[in-house]
Amino acid sequence: MSVCVRWTGVETKAFRDALRMAQEPFAAFVGVSCDAVKKWERRLDDITLSPNYARRLDDKLSAADPAVVERFWAILHEPTIAESESLAPVSGRANAKFDDDDCLVVSARALTGEMVLVAVPRRTFVLGIGAGAVSAVMSGALPSTPRNPLAAMFADASIDHVNHFDKLRMSLIESDNLYGSAQTLPHVLSALDLLGQLKQAKVGDPHGILRMQAMFAETAAWQCQDQRNFVSAGYWAAQALQLSHRLADDYFIGLSLVRLSQLACDQGDAGEAEELASAARRSAPQDSLFSAAALTFRAHAQALEGDQTGSARAYDNARKIVSVAPDDPKWGMFLDHSYVDAYQAHTRAETGDYVGATTQFVEALAQMQPNYPRDRGVYLARAAVAYMAAGQIEPAAIAGRRALEIGMGTRSARILHKVRQLSGMIDPASTQTGVAEFRDAVTAWEEQSWPDRT
């Protein structure tokens, strides 16, 4: 998912101003000529950047400090904010605090096609999914009504709010597995906002509401992670851990630590991943799926640090636990032998054993559960890159094209990131079977995602 869906000279200048850089160092930071930056800023809204440049800027923005991201959106929407006297002033300070009622007013297109102004909570906008938060507002996912009516509304009601959110979370997890986190993340963030309102209004079982907040925060972290939005994923995982400590419940603490461990794995921080996995293992029940997940991520981290023997042993222990662990109806439904195999294949690919990786990916794909198409796409994309690294171009192109189809359907950045990597590895002039079809599919995807109007 793109952080900024449209890159023109306006967005480019806003990003440079947010970074507080002059044009020359900004050009070096992005990896373009200073003349290009000058041209973009001179033409402003009259120029739309090419897909390559837009992707480059979006990647830089995605990896930027949250304070920079806040300044970027504040600069873009500064004129609109200035016209609204009822809003709190926008602060560009890195240590600015978010007030619950502090909002940004942004323009958005309604279903009727007209441009309207909507108020988006600054916390949701900055720490959530950026422009996606606006879509959530427009679809009614984020409430714009005052929060205090909930107390009166449910004063005499015997509604089980915890049960409602428990069922909602499971439904959103199933939808995420089927259709991708890009579809479900706005609803997860909306649920977190509503849970906060219920807690503030003292509606429902306070301990149960806190438990749901921890569960939804972990879910938000995972779905941001699937979008490779690591800043937001880290924020929500930390929130989940904080809430879990307030619950004083090892189950939820283990859940949060497992999430943080996998997030560190995805970011290539082996030392952090191993420490967090070990902490999760200590917190979680020893024969639980949490423990198996912790061992899986620890195994990956050990391999990245060069401990291949320890990694293999940890993977074997994870499989033993999967064989005896009781079913967990709330978490870990995905965790079976094929999941461990696929992750070990990923480890092999990341550590240079490309042939071993491709063999294990084939075995994992053959055994995986059918109702996880997004995960299938992730495995296919990783397998495709491993095939290419092993010099097997035809299976790489075939697997890559299948992964792209799933990636376009789910908009999973984990899939599309690997497809883009594969695209850069394959010689476009190759006449081997499947290459032309893969290149055509990638070109169609890029044209659809980043129309070039320069």
Image (spheres, grey):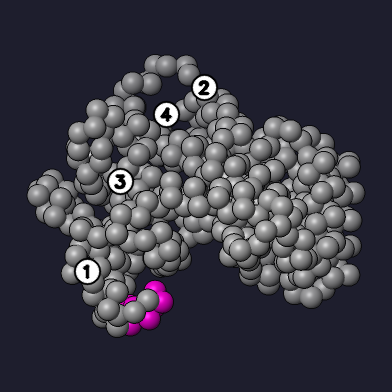
Rendered location of residue 233, percent (x, y) = 52, 54
- The C terminus lies in quadrant: bottom left
Q: CA distance from mark 2 to mark 4?
A: 10 Å
Q: Kindly identify the residue that appears in the image at 25 percent across and 37 percent down.
A: 109
Q: Is residue 294 above or below residue 200?
A: below
Q: Nearer the viewer, mark 4 or mark 3?
A: 3
Which residue type carries mark 2?
Asp
Secondary structure category for the residue under label 3: strand
Q: CA distance from mark 2 to mark 1?
A: 54 Å
Q: CA distance from mark 2 to mark 3?
A: 27 Å
Rendered location of residue 421, percent (x, y) = 60, 62
* Mark carried by residue 41: 1
Q: Nearer the viewer, mark 4 or mark 1?
A: 1
Q: CA distance from mark 4 to mark 1?
A: 51 Å
Residue position for label 4: 203
Mark nearer the N terminus (4 vs 3): 3
Circle 2 residues within 10 Å: few <14, some 14–19, many ≥20: few
Which residue type carries mark 4?
Val
Residue position for label 3: 121
Mark nearer the N terminus (4 vs 1): 1
Mark nearer the N terminus (1 vs 3): 1
Q: CA distance from mark 4 to mark 3?
A: 22 Å
Q: Quadrant of residue 86?
A: top left
Q: Kindly identify the residue that appears in the image at 31 percent across and 34 percent down.
A: 138
Q: Nearer the viewer, mark 2 or mark 1?
A: 1
Q: Is residue 166 visible?
A: no
Label 4 with label 1: CB-CB less than 8 Å? no
Q: Which residues are magenta?
A: 25-31
Circle 4 residues within 10 Å: few <14, some 14–19, many ≥20: many
Q: Is residue 323 visible?
A: yes
